[in-house]
Amino acid sequence: MPEVLAEATNVSRVFGRFTAVDGVDLAVGPGEVVGLLGANGAGKTTLIRMLLGLLPVSAGTVRLFGQPPSRASRRRVGYLPQGLGLYDDLTIAENLAFSRAVFGGGRGQDPGPLRRYAGMAVRDLPLGGAAGPALPRRYAAVPVRDLPLGVARRAGFAQVLAHAPELLLLDEPTSGVDPLARARLWETISQTAADGAGVIVTTHNMEEAEECTRLVVLAGGREVAAGRAAQITGQARTAVVWAADWAAALRRLEAAGLRAVLAGPVLRVPGRTVAEVTAALDDLPAELSTEPATLEERFFELVAAG
């Protein structure tokens, strides 16, 4: 049976009368990248914090490396919270040095092959010393609190990798990062998994979701779908409308309560049949067809239904 690095079994978390997570199952093994998808408030961050033992569960069980979460098991984890987890009054290099010392990856110790990816994660911002050439002068002595958000986020990602963790828990790791840096961060995530680490990552970006081995979609704290991206989209279809007067078509669809999105020269109406769209358009001239739904369209369907 494959090793399970982190596992949640029928886990729930209740805050007063509010249920943030409701009976969710989740597991990740070595070499996997498991994506958590969901709107704000879906329970993604709460689930990660329960896996780490930072929040107690209201029901169900969580395991890190086969045991209840503990300080010892957390030393084997790289956790990137939305708040980055960096000390604001330290520079990037000082944060990395502190992290390596705390997690046992300091001078004279070899944390393993994943160490090199700390440099990859911030290739445009070398960290100095063993991690790369000298830091650009404009950032070398700048406290984290004064760094641009994208630079600080890349530094936080590098810190997560600095002690070569066996499991990465990444909460919106690319938020505020430019497209090139985002691509390089995902290159690092994929390579880290290829080297044997497990990864759980939350994201709102559907292109990023396509990079994941498996996905778990949360809505209202509950799991509404799970599997590979192709399994989640499945046989779902989207009605496609071409109309000379697309603005008029959009108005009629919205008036009928049908959600439509303009995509180039056509309107896409996910989750609706040609018959429903035809009825909504009434006598407006238009050509209709169907196409396979995209992951983003299927995601919004699931969230709305959940």
Image: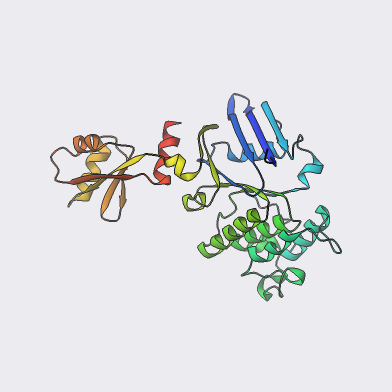
Residue at horizontal 66%, vertical 73%?
A: 138
Q: Is residue 71 above or below residue 195?
A: above
Q: Residue furthest right?
A: 108
Q: Is residue 262 left or right of residue 248?
A: right
Q: Position of residue 88 (x, y in %)?
A: 71, 57
Q: Quadrant of the N terminus?
A: top right
Give the percent coordinates (x, y) of residue 147.
64, 63
As displayed, is residue 193 above or below residue 25? below
Which x, y percent locates residue 209?
Answer: 51, 49
Location of residue 120 with respect to 74 vertically, above or below? below
Total number of numbered discs in the rendering: 0
- Quadrant in which residue 142 is drawn: bottom right
Task: Please tell me which residue is depicted at 61% across the width and 41% down the height of the picture.
Answer: 45
Question: Which picture quadrant has residue 190?
Answer: bottom right
Q: How is the image coloured?
A: rainbow
3 sits left or right of 235 in the view: right
Residue at image position (77%, 35%) is 67
Q: Is residue 305 left or right of residue 291?
A: right
Q: Nearer the viewer, residue 146 or 150?
A: 150
Q: Is residue 260 visible?
A: no
Residue 103 image offset from top left, x and y in percent: 81, 53
Residue 213 in sight:
yes
- Which residue is rendered at x = 67% and y = 26% of the image? 60
